[in-house]
Image (tube, rainbow, N blue to C red):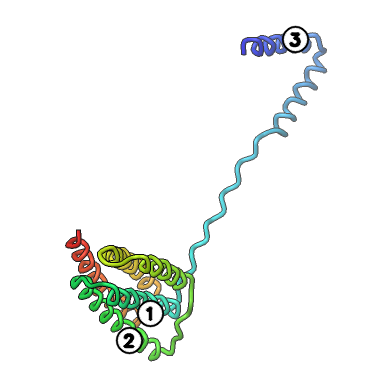
Amino acid sequence: MKNVTKLVTISLLASTLLLASNSCKKSGEQAANTETTTETTATPEPAAPAPTPEPAKLTDPEIASIAVTANQIDVNYAEIALKKSTNKAVTDFAKTMAKDHKAVIDQAVALVKKLNVTPQDNPTTQSLLKGEADVKAKFETKSGADFDKAYVDNEVEYHKAVISVVEKDLVPNATNPELKALLESALPLFKEHLAHAEMVQKNMK
């Protein structure tokens, strides 16, 4: 490092002596060239980042699809629990889930028929179905107390996720007043389900 510094110092000194020996005209030209070089090599300002596009808003037909699918998935989970579990607390909970979610589905189907709306497939619906397939595969590998725990743990997380989607995505994006009202009326029921699932979960520990 010292050698490099010494070489740089010598080079600078030699350059200074050379410039001193040149004529005034030459010095003026050199200064002009230096200014030109400085302007040419100036670092350009970084470009402003491109704005992030907002996610597309859900339409009422897409919301109807998500609502029906989410409720049907929990009915499917409940039916699996009723076949595999012998724990009364778990089967009682599963019966409640099947009954309540079927009722919400019936209301949603009746409403879309009344509004002449056809539920439309969308990425959220597909994500729900993918999650269902993964959970079912996990359920197939479990039995007895292990299955009961897996089912109840999943119900806690599933209801948290559904409540979040309804509150943050479905209700704000719904444009039909009756569809919005149906979603809002289902929220207290889903929160009641979550509390019930958490109670069963706590008692199983």
- Can see residue 203? yes
Name the residue type under label 2: Asp
Query: Where does the N terminus fall, quadrant-wise?
Result: top right
Quarter of the image holding residue 200? bottom left
Sequence-wise, the earlier of marks 3 and 1 is 3
- Inspect the image, locate mark 1, and give the three-letter code of the amino acid beneath it: Val
Q: Earlier in the sequence, mark 3 or mark 2?
A: 3
Disc number for residue 68:
1
Count every numbered label the image shows and give the total: 3
Q: Amino acid at mark 3?
A: Ala
Question: Which residue corresponds to the image point at 26% horizontal and 81% vertical from the top-left?
Answer: 99
Q: How busy is the neighbourhood of tag 1: few (under 14 within 10 Å), some, or many (20 plus)?
A: many
* Residue 160 in view, yes or no: no
Residue toward you, 69 or 39: 69
Q: N-terminal of the two: label 1 or label 2?
A: 1
Vertical position of residue 132 compared to residue 72: above or below? above
Q: CA distance from mark 1 to mark 2?
A: 9 Å
